[in-house]
Image: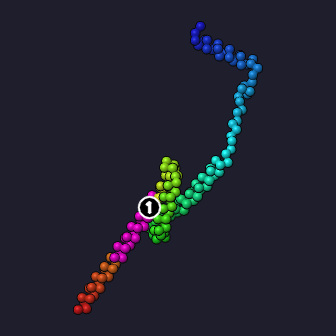
Amino acid sequence: MSFWNFLGDFAIFNMICNLFSRKSKSSTIGTYQPHYIINSQYEARIQELEDEIKESEKRIAECQKIIDNSQPADLKDYDIDELQDCIDELEDQLDNCDVGSNRYDRIQDGMDRLQDRLDDMEELDDIMDDFDDLDSFRDDIYDADSYRDDW
């Protein structure tokens, strides 16, 4: 008798035993349902954290509106102090987050975009100041030429 014959006979024997067995298979499966103790403080804390997340997402969306406009002409629409306030507020939110969380990464990305936007605005202001200085210099040159012509 080979191993495979023995295994086949054993399987047939189990099938016959299962047919004549009086136990139903549905009774062997337990319907265990754990009974959880609801902790109201835990539930309240979860709700509080979810509310904080929603408020943070609203604030991030507001700051995102400022970030999304990438046209240099739109830079005049926003005050530098307003952007700096947004960055400061996001830094405060960043201090209250776990370093490895997705929220931390989103806030950090938002801060980086706001800071880039702020740098662009300051650079544009510097360029405009340079143009104003150039215009003043050119006006001074033309005034000096007209002064010489009068002699």
Percent of width and height locating residue 111: 47, 58
Up the image or down, 45 lies above or below 14; here it is below
Which x, y percent locates residue 90? 50, 59
Farthest residue in the right direction? 22
- Find out whether residue 136 is within the magenta segment: no
Determine whether the residue tagged by mark 1 lies in a helix, strand or loop.
helix
Q: How is the image coloured?
A: rainbow
- Tell me the kind of residue under disc 1: Gln
Q: Give the magenta range.
A: 112-133
Percent position of residue 70, x then y: 46, 64
Q: Which residue is mark 1?
A: 115
Q: Within the image, what quadrant is residue 16 found in?
A: top right
Could you say which is closer to the camera, residue 22 or residue 85? Answer: 85
Residue nearer the viewer, 2 or 88: 88
The answer to whether residue 10 is above or below residue 39 is: above
Tag count in the figure? Answer: 1
Q: Quadrant of the N terminus?
A: top right
Q: Residues within 10 Å of mark 1 (few under 14, many from 20)?
A: some
Question: To which quarter of the image does residue 13 belong?
Answer: top right
